[in-house]
Amino acid sequence: MEHPILFLDVLTGMLGLHIPPHVTYAWLIMALLVGLGYLAAKPRALVPAGGQSFFELVIGGLEEFMVDITGEEGRAFFPYIGTLFLYIWVCNLIGLIPGFFSPTANINTTLSMALCTFIYTHYLGIKFHGAKYIKHFLGPVPALAPLFLPIEIVGHLARVMSLTLRLFGNIMGEDLVLAILLMLAGAFLAPLPMMFLAIFTCTVQAFIFCLLSIMYFTGSMEEAH
């Protein structure tokens, strides 16, 4: 559900460009995160303050939570998880601002991130186990390998669908409810309580996507049983 007037659509229309909203707003968010990250890291103060303090709080807390689940070897893929969380979080939140659009309310965006997690999961499995990673798909008994292999393949492909549809459905539904409330009430303050709930939902959905990714990564690094 898009806002009737999107700021970047007006801008690209003036330039004669026809780019889907989920692409333009994804680029905007990437530029915003890179810019904020640069400004926050630039002072490099011993006692963090302002943006540096906020980023250290969010990133440090997320890293410690992840390491508690994965162990120290999980730090190797924390840059991916940290980037993924911040990107999804801002993508979810930006749609709450009139004139802006949540890229995660488009299934193409959520599918692209799910595919990245899927590919990185098996990259880690091959990196840690080499050719022995195939044991994760063959089950506990060699005689049952022909049965377990297709089941495991379908299960791993279903992860992509699960990650894609969960995030897309929640953010799309949230934007739709807010838009309906706004149209029915005819005032900006009417759906305000729903917006506070939406902020919580946006944060939870970003966290769930990253938590599931961490669990998939951890499973690929474990020894097959």
Image (spheres, grey):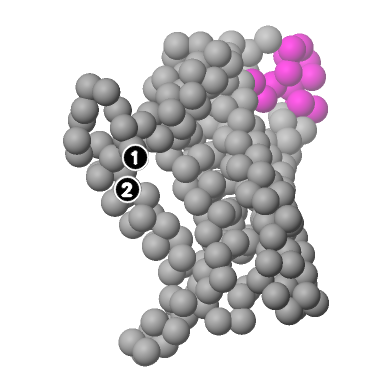
Q: Taking 19 as reference, is 178 above or below it?
A: above
Tell me the magenta residue range: 136-148
**Residue 167 visible in the shown view:** no
Residue highlighted by disc 1: 51
Q: Residue at x 76, y 26 (%)?
A: 148
Mark 1: few, some, or many residues within 10 Å (few <14, many ≥20)?
some
SS label for mark 2: helix
Mark 2: few, some, or many residues within 10 Å (few <14, many ≥20)?
some
Q: Residue at x 73, y 79 (%)?
A: 186
What is the quadrant of the N terminus in the image? bottom right
Residue 162 in the image: state x and y as whole percent.
71, 44
Q: Quadrant of residue 65?
A: top right
The disc placed on residue 36 is 2
Give the spatial CA distance, label 1 vs label 2.
8 Å
Q: Nearer the viewer, mark 1 or mark 2?
A: 1
Q: Taking 219 as reference, is 161 above or below it?
A: below
Instruction: Tell me which secondary structure the magenta stretch mostly adopts.
Output: helix
What is the quadrant of the C terminus in the image? top right
The type of residue carrying mark 1 is: Gly
Q: Residue at x 58, y 54 (%)?
A: 92
Q: Residue at x 25, y 36 (%)?
A: 41
CB atoms of marks 1 and 2 within 8 Å: yes
The disc placed on residue 163 is none
